[in-house]
Image (tube, coloured by chain):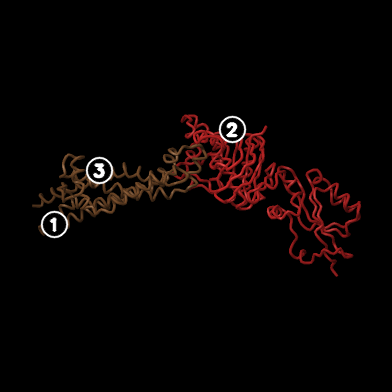
Chain colours: A brown, B red
């Protein structure tokens, strides 16, 4: 019995970590450029193309407005197209990522917004191109904020991944619902919650350390 | 040799006029101070000079190239010829001090080895040899500005612009930063434009002073010229108030415009660099039989020259020969008023 529980929990933890890690990574890969696009097109001292960035913002907000459980179902055809299947851990990464990208884009946008205009001006005056401003000023100066934003996103994804159980993705949340809640197995439920707390704590701790390391 | 030639420069933002028909030249190796109160158009002029702003009218010739005609791509290259020192330093905290200084060189595409040599050289020049690996946030204000200066001159610009570079610093640090700038001007022959609202900043080092008021250039000359021309011009008087001797309030209250008998005559006298070295007060005493009291003021370093700006109390009214003597010897003579004798 305990062996089974241990195995189930170990398996589920791995699935959750997989889903959260993969979708966080994808959130950064697509969300950060979106955030840079939204900032750089809005600023008069960079590209000054507000008509380009604003629609991107609308799409980002529209995606964030859809509840995740609905998004999960709505995206089934997309998921099938990208992952080849609409079931399982791999399939869950698609809707998780699509939810995480706009979420992270807005969070990253806040950190990028905080950059002092004087720093951008300094690089412009040195004869830096707009691309150099993004590379030398925006990203590195916002890095502490970008990292804490990533931490927040990853922790939100731990919660969201529980719902991915609906499409058979497994994971800790799914385990707690199916074994713990639906079958009244309180041992599994409390163990899973404890593991989740530990996982979130680990992510937060790693994030805090990373921020400290880049801030110095 | 003329480095910078600005002619007919006007800048408007909508209905607001920031600069009106500003023309001046800057010679290679000069230190020029641009002074004006806030809103006078200093920042706009600066932004035009470093090609961040395109003027509505006029031309800016820097080293022969007209900044107002260049395309965005050409401007990127043109800006590398101008170094800018900021009031609030604008250093990147994500980079070490050395990496901040290296930034303009990275942008200009220098090789790693050349950058390392140049940065070491610059750190020594600004006196921060041991601070290269620190973060800007670990430095004091004065040290940050030294980094700002090193960064601005890293790519050997032909013109260094200083935008209120000392306004965020205390007087002692201000002096050391100005000293560094003067030193750079002397040793590297770098042309410097100091933009400031503080007369004290331009007084000592600027070879020439440009005064902006309400978008227009109202004065262009040496500090000595400015001290002479300022008489009666409230716009200039206001700017000069910081560095000019003023009458103590107690005396000002007693002062009248009536040359009654036995009263002390208060005269403001400015001596240029030639006369400032002579025993001027003794000559007043021996030749004109005056008892002279120094009420306020003394020697003043102006654009590298020594001048004297003082308020004297004379025991007798100004006689005709004394007036002629003052006209000949003094740069500026101005009778301020009369103070009744103590009785």
Q: Chain of mark 1?
A: A
Q: Residues within 10 Å of mark 1 (few under 14, many from 20)?
A: some
Q: Nearer the viewer, mark 2 or mark 3?
A: 2
Q: Is residue A170 visible?
A: yes
Q: Are marks 2 and 3 in contact (CB under 8 Å)?
A: no
Residue displayed at 16% across by 44% down: A86
Compare residues A57 and B193 and report the one nearer the observer.
A57
Residues tagged by mark 1 and mark 3 found on one chain of the structure: yes
**Alpha-carbon distance for marks 2 and 3?**
53 Å
Q: Which residue is mark 2?
A: B65
Mark whose residue sits in front, 1 or 3: 3
Q: Position of residue B130 (x, y in %)?
A: 52, 40
Identify the residue position indicated by label 3 in the image. A22
User: What separation in Å lies between label 1 and label 3 (alpha carbons)?
Assistant: 26 Å
Q: Which residue is mark 1?
A: A180
> What is the chain letter for disc 3?
A
- Mark closest to the chain's N terminus, 1 or 3: 3
Comparing marks 2 and 1, which lies closer to the viewer?
2
Furthest-bottom residue in view?
B343
């Amino acid at each position: 019995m305990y062996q089974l529980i241990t195995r189930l929990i170990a398996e589920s933890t791995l699935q959750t970590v997989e889903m959260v890690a993969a979708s966080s990574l994808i959130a950064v890969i697509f969300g950060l450029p979106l955030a840079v696009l939204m900032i750089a097109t809005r600023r008069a001292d960079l590209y000054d193309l507000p008509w380009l960035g604003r629609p991107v913002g609308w799409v980002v907000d529209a995606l964030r407005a859809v509840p995740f459980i609905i998004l999960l179902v709505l995206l089934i055809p997309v998921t099938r197209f990208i992952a080849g299947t609409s079931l399982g851990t791999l399939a869950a990464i698609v809707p998780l990522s699509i939810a995480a990208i706009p979420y992270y884009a807005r969070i990253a946008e806040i950190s990028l917004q905080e950059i002092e205009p004087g720093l951008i001006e300094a690089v412009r005056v040195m004869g830096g191109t707009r691309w150099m401003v993004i590379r030398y000023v925006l990203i590195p100066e916002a890095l502490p904020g970008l990292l804490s934003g990533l931490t927040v996103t990853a922790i939100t994804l731990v919660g969201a991944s529980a719902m991915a159980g609906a499409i058979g993705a497994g994971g800790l949340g799914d385990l707690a619902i199916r074994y713990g809640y639906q079958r009244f197995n309180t041992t599994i439920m409390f163990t899973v919650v404890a593991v989740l707390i530990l996982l979130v704590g680990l992510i937060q701790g790693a994030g805090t350390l990373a921020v400290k390391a880049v801030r110095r | 040799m003329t480095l910078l030639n600005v002619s007919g420069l006007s800048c408007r933002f909508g209905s607001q006029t920031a600069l009106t028909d500003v023309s001046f030249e800057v010679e290679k190796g000069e230190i020029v101070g641009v002074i004006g109160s806030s809103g006078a158009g200093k920042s706009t002029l600066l932004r035009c000079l470093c090609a961040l702003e395109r003027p509505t009218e006029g031309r800016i010739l820097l080293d022969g190239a007209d900044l107002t005609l260049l395309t965005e791509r050409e401007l990127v290259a043109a800006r590398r010829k101008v170094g800018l020192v900021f009031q609030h330093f604008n250093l990147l905290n994500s980079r070490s001090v050395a990496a901040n200084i290296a930034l303009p060189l990275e942008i200009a595409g220098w090789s790693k080895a050349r950058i390392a040599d140049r940065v070491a050289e610059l750190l020594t020049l600004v006196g921060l040899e041991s601070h290269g690996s620190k973060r800007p946030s670990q430095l004091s204000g004065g040290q940050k500005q030294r980094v700002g200066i090193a960064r601005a001159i890293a790519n050997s610009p032909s013109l260094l612009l200083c935008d209120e570079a000392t306004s965020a610093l205390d007087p002692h640090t201000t002096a050391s930063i100005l000293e560094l700038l003067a030193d750079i001007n002397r040793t590297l022959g770098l042309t410097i434009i100091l933009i400031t609202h503080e007369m004290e900043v331009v007084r000592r080092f600027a070879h020439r002073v440009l005064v902006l008021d309400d978008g227009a250039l109202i004065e262009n000359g040496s500090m000595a010229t400015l001290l002479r021309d300022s008489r009666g011009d409230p716009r200039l008087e206001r700017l000069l108030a910081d560095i000019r001797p003023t009458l103590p309030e107690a005396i000002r209250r007693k002062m009248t415009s009536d040359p009654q008998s036995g009263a002390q005559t208060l005269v403001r006298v400015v001596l240029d660099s030639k006369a400032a070295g002579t025993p001027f007060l003794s000559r007043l005493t021996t030749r004109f039989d005056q008892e002279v009291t120094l009420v306020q003021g003394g020697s003043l370093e102006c654009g590298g020259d020594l001048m004297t700006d003082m308020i004297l109390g004379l025991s007798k009214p100004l006689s005709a020969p004394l007036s002629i003597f003052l006209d000949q010897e003094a740069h500026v003579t101005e009778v301020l008023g009369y103070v009744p004798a103590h009785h």
